[in-house]
Amino acid sequence: MSYEAKRLIEIRQGVLSKNDQLAAELRSRFHAAGVFVVNLLSSPGAGKTSLLEATMRALLAEYRVAALVGDLATDNDARRLARSGGLVRQIQTGDMCHLEADIVARHLEGWDLHELDLLFIENVGNLVCPSGYDLGEATRVVLLSTTEGEDKPLKYPSTFATADAVLLTKMDLAEPVGFDRAQAEANIRAVNPLAPIIATSARREGGLDEWLAWLRERVTMQKEQRRSSG
């Protein structure tokens, strides 16, 4: 291995080590404040923003909800999410294809985490880089759209392997685009045997019920664990 290649590996390991340390600090802050944090990952156009807007609308009657939204250049997603009535802040990453723990920490400034129950972090649309960066989240959710094809979990195994849940999105389009759900689930299981696979449709009535029930259960579990730990 050349010196340049070794140096690049050393730099990357150093960056990830620093990120992991900052992520651990963030996780401690979130836990102390009692806020449940969800990191959403997907490719561009998989429906993260539509799903998140519908999710926030559905949960705002029960929880105090906020979102950090990562994007390369625009604030379009943040403006859309603000329509839900939740607290929203845009993160413009410029040429960075992922969010990192220090970026999240900086954009939390001015927010009182004790006044939140749920924080969603909508990561930059990308199935490669974000998988390697812990953001201090309680759970990591990866989206797979019916319009993307069934083979994405095999093409991007590290992303799907790190998911605590996988959401199949745009299920209202599954039949028109010829989506093979059984094959998609088999491909997910090939790289992640345990994560629940939840079918969703942000546009169909009742299309988020299973996802919302899963979220509520996880939030309740964290609250109970926090109470039991004193």
Image (cartoon, grey):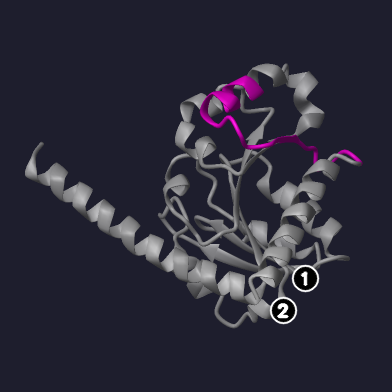
Residue 148 inside the magenta-drawn segment:
no
Q: Is residue 44 above or below residue 13?
A: above
The amino acid beneath tag 1 is: Arg
The amino acid beneath tag 2 is: Glu
Q: Is residue 11 above or below residue 156?
A: below
In the rendered image, residue 214, in percent from the top left (x then y), is placed at: 76, 47
* Residue occupying image coordinates x 46% and y 53%: 98
6 or 34: which is nearer to us? 34
Residue 80 in view (yes/no):
no
Q: Are marks 2 and 1 in contact (CB under 8 Å)?
A: yes
Q: Which residue is mark 2?
A: 115
Q: Quadrant of residue 199?
A: top right
In the rendered image, residue 198, in percent from the top left (x then y), is placed at: 73, 36
Looking at the rendering, in which quadrant would you find the N terminus? top left
In the rendered image, the residue lying farthest to the left is: 3
- For mark 2, give the secondary structure: helix
Q: Which residues are magenta?
A: 185-205
* Residue occupying image coordinates x 85% and y 39%: 207
Classed neighbour count for the residue bearing mark 2: other residues with Cα under 10 Å, few (<14), some (14–19), many (≥20): few
* Residue occupying image coordinates x 83% and y 65%: 60
Residue 203 in view (yes/no):
yes
Q: Which residue is mark 1?
A: 64
Query: Spatial distance from mark 2 to mark 1, Cα to Cα?
Result: 7 Å
25 or 226: which is nearer to us? 226
Residue 191 inside the magenta-drawn segment:
yes
Q: Is residue 50 above or below residue 103?
A: above
Q: Quadrant of residue 211?
A: top right
Q: Is residue 181 above or below residue 113?
A: above
- For mark 1, give the secondary structure: loop
